[in-house]
Image (cartoon, helix red, strand yellow):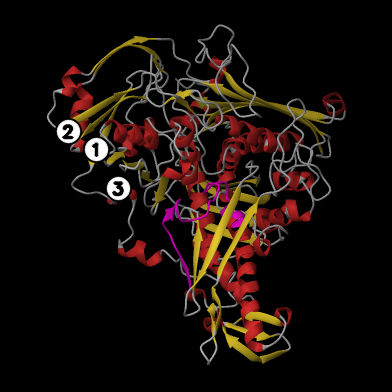
């Protein structure tokens, strides 16, 4: 019987959050703190002819105004982005100047008084336009930008990265095809819409030590970036992260922390805060990628996939940031979880005059699987095959190879056919795809399959365990608590390993890079794998120390001892034991002699055997395993006015091992909600000049009360042998298929090929009427 894992243990942060006691970055204010507000661009693309700060400087309470002249460039994979715009702005909302003042209202007033003279330039408003031969070149210095090794920009173009995957022979693939389909697909960038907007607090102490508190997912990345850009001693940079009110990938990017550092430096190191308003969080901060795609699929008459030719054009916005790595992820998994012997995929990262792109929950997979799963339904319809059975027939299995030619086994790929069978049962699929409700409405179903791996080679994590005199244990991990509950799972893993009460395991929620071992970043559904494996190593280290001390007390070999049930005991004579609390701080004999000391376990883990992709073929291993799933949506559709109501959403995920059942359900249901919201409503609308009208949540289209369907989730457990107790990542995975499942359901209902997001009634009406979207 499992001691702790698999159970719905209450989260370690629950009491603080439900009582309102939890502290977030914006809560950490004091009377001496100064405040930073930004002057941002009113144009999507323009030369900066003049910046006049004279009126702003006269405002009482203004301490400094910082401009972008001569500041270094920054960026995640390509250093192409100025911290504050210099000479040119490339997206609407780009920071131009930062005002430091005694109150945020004073800073805002002064920022509004900064007068900027622009010379508008032609705007590149989508990836297709960016690739036209005579289009405006957004980065003329692309050839000389500093970049990482496996990024391949194309000079004198708007292409920041181009990743190619070539598997098999396309000629052979098309020769073996009896039938084919082709389609064009698109979706615009969108916002993360976390409850907590981005915020950073910076202070530079007299000894040069930089203290940063931020709403970040990457505190150790902030240390490295500040050290690299400003040539600071990394040991003198301390990044702290309290609770984070949602992130969804959007707080991986390092942006406002750099501006806040400059602001503090400009006023002698005093403590400053830069808090984004909701509008700034939507237009100035980085966003989710947009996508245009073309797909051609071939198959035999009996439904066996033979060939896939794919072009994905990723809208990375004005700067590359995470767009280049997203491009790699797109190329590596762009065929969906299917066995296709002949693949040609080009993933192209394209500059536009949109806000720049960063990670978003799913890291490109919901976008590309919307595209590919729509194509799968189109092909199933042309073959006159049941779309569920068509997918099962082509499901990727152990013994197959991934698009990047990685040989798969049961541990790495899990059980997709099992997920499909379970979904079929849950959705009562035999009932049919379309069932009349009344004279006006239809109940319709759609489904898809999903998979995801990570592309984070070299990612590592460290964990330290500190034992207390009462036998309880403190866990120190650099995982950032952004709402996913991983630190509670770490406590469960330790309780399982030591067979102790999980309530005697304590986890420090705040991250402090000075005192807590590094965790790569809290991203990619890799927290449990990275920190979980590191924790189990730390537990083994602690067990070895406990056995060593106890062996001298019990006069036996350490190998004879086991640790569990808050004891260290002889394995074949459990009645001979010493309490763990009596040896975890060393042991004192009755005569006063002492041995040992505080037990401190340490462990680390690095993902192994991942490689870069070959520049010409795409061959390589991008992730340790794939989490697969099957997902579906049931809607009530009105063909008269093209409105619909979400009734049920389904996800069956091969999770490897359920570690915390209630947390897993919460993760999956929350993911489904986000995926459906993005599919049905969420998007950033751009004017022809690249500006964004009314960037507010009330017009953005997030779900309100009553919009949610019933969420149905279930799990399979095919162990990932490298994962802690066999677990796979699951934090993002139920989001991934929701846009495709909804689009497939509505396409079934309308008889149309709905290949663009979001799926609004207006879009469906325009598609039916043959009216182009303006």
Tell me: residue 583, above or below residue 366.
below
Q: Indicate which disc residue 205 carries.
A: none
Q: CA distance from mark 1 to mark 2?
A: 9 Å
Q: In the picture provided, is 344 more to the left or to the right than 633?
A: right
Residue most toward the top? 134
Examine the structure image and report whether residue 245 is included in the region drawn in magenta: no
Please tell me whether residue 455 is drawn above or below residue 569 in the rendered image: above
Could you tell me which residue is drawn at 47 percent across and 78 percent down?
469
Spatial separation of the CA atoms under disc 3 and disc 2? 18 Å
305 horizontally vs 494: left or right: right
Residue 427, visible in the rendered structure: no
Figure quadrant of residue 612: top right
Earlier sequence position, callout 3 versus callout 2: 3
Q: In the depicted view, which residue is nearer to us: 92 or 420?
A: 92
Could you tell me how far apart the alpha carbons at marks 1 and 3 are, in whole angstroms?
A: 11 Å
Residue identified by numbered label 2? 106
- Residue at the spot 41% in from the left edge and 47% down from the top edge: 238
SS for callout 3: helix
Q: For mark 1, what is the residue?
A: 35
Q: Residues within 10 Å of mark 2 (few under 14, many from 20)?
A: many
Examine the residues drawn in magenta and state their main secondary structure. Answer: loop
Quadrant of residue 684 within the rendered picture: top left
* Observer-nearest of 494 and 187: 494
Task: Give the magenta-colored segment's residue range.
Answer: 505-530
Kindly identify the residue that appears in the image at 62 percent across and 34 percent down: 371
The residue that disc 3 covers is: 26
**Residue 14 appears in view:** yes
């Amino acid at each position: 019987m499992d001691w702790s894992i698999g159970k719905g243990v209450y989260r370690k942060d629950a009491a603080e959050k439900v009582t309102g006691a939890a502290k977030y970055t914006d809560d950490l204010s004091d009377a001496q703190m100064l405040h930073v507000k930004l002057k941002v661009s009113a144009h999507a693309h323009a030369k900066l002819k003049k910046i006049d700060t004279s009126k702003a400087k006269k405002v009482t309470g203004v301490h400094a105004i910082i401009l972008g002249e001569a500041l270094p460039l920054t960026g995640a994979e390509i250093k192409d982005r100025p911290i504050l715009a210099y000479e040119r702005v490339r997206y609407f909302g780009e920071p131009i100047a930062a005002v430091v003042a005694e109150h945020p209202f004073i800073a805002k007033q002064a920022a509004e008084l900064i007068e900027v003279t622009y010379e508008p330039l032609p705007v590149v408003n989508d990836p297709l336009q960016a690739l036209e031969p005579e289009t405006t070149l957004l980065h003329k210095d692309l050839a000389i930008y500093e970049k990482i090794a496996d990024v391949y920009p194309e000079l004198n173009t708007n292409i920041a990265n181009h990743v190619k995957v070539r598997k098999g022979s396309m000629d052979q693939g098309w020769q073996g095809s009896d039938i084919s389909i082709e389609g064009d697909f698109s979706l615009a960038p969108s916002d993360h819409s976390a409850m907590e907007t981005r915020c950073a607090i910076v202070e530079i102490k007299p000894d040069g030590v930089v203290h940063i508190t931020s709403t970040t997912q990457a505190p150790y990345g902030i240390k490295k970036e500040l050290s690299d850009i400003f040539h600071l001693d990394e040991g003198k940079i301390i990044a702290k992260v309290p609770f984070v009110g949602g992130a969804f990938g959007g707080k991986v990017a390092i942006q406002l922390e750099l501006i806040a550092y400059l602001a503090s430096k400009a006023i002698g190191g005093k403590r400053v805060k830069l808090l984004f308003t909701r509008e700034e969080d939507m237009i100035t901060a980085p966003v989710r990628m947009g996508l245009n795609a073309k797909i051609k699929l071939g198959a035999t008459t009996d439904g066996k996939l033979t060939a896939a030719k794919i072009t994905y054009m990723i809208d990375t916005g004005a700067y590359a940031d995470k767009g280049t790595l997203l491009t790699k992820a797109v190329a590596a998994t762009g065929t969906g979880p299917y066995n296709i012997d002949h693949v040609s995929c080009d993933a192209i990262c394209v500059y536009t005059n949109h806000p720049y792109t960063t990670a978003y929950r799913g890291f490109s997979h919901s976008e590309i699987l919307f595209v590919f799963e729509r194509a799968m339904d189109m092909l199933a319809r042309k073959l006159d095959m049941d779309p569920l059975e068509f997918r099962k027939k082509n499901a990727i299995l152990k013994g197959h190879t991934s698009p990047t030619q990685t040989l798969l086994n049961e541990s790495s790929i899990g059980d997709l056919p099992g997920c499909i069978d379970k979904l079929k049962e849950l959705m009562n699929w035999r009932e049919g795809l379309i069932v009349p409700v009344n004279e006006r409405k239809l109940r319709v179903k759609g489904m898809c399959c999903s998979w995801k791996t990570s592309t984070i080679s070299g990612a590592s994590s460290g964990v330290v365990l500190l034992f207390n005199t009462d036998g309880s244990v403190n866990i120190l991990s650099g995982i950032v608590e952004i709402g996913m509950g991983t630190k509670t799972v770490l406590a469960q893993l330790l309780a399982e390993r030591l067979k102790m009460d999980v309530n005697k395991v304590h986890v420090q929620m705040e991250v402090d890079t000075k005192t807590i071992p590094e965790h790569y970043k809290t991203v990619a559904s890799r927290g449990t794998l990275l920190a979980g494996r590191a924790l189990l190593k730390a537990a083994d280290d602690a067990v070895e120390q406990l056995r060593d001390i106890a062996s001298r007390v019990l006069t036996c070999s350490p190998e004879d001892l086991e640790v569990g049930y808050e004891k260290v005991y002889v394995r074949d004579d459990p009645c001979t034991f010493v309490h763990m609390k009596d040896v975890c701080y060393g042991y004192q004999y009755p005569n006063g002699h002492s041995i040992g000391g505080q037990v401190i376990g340490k462990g680390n883990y690095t993902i192994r055997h991942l490689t870069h992709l070959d520049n010409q073929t795409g061959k390589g291993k991008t992730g340790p395993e794939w989490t697969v799933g099957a997902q579906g949506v049931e809607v009530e559709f009105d063909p008269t006015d093209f409105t619909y109501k979400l009734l049920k959403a389904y996800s069956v995920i091969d999770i490897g091992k359920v570690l915390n059942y209630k947390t897993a359900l919460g993760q999956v249901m929350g993911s489904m909600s986000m995926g459906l919201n993005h599919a049905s409503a969420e998007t950033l609308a751009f004017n022809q000049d690249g500006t964004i009208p009314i960037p507010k949540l009330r017009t953005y289209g997030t779900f309100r009360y009553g919009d949610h369907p019933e969420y149905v989730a279930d799990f399979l457990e095919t162990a990932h042998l490298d994962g802690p107790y066999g677990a796979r990542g699951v934090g993002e995975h139920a989001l991934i298929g929701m846009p495709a499942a909804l689009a497939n359901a509505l396409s079934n209902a309308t008889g149309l090929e709905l290949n663009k997001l979001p799926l609004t009634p207006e879009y469906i009406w325009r598609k039916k009427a043959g009216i182009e979207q303006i």
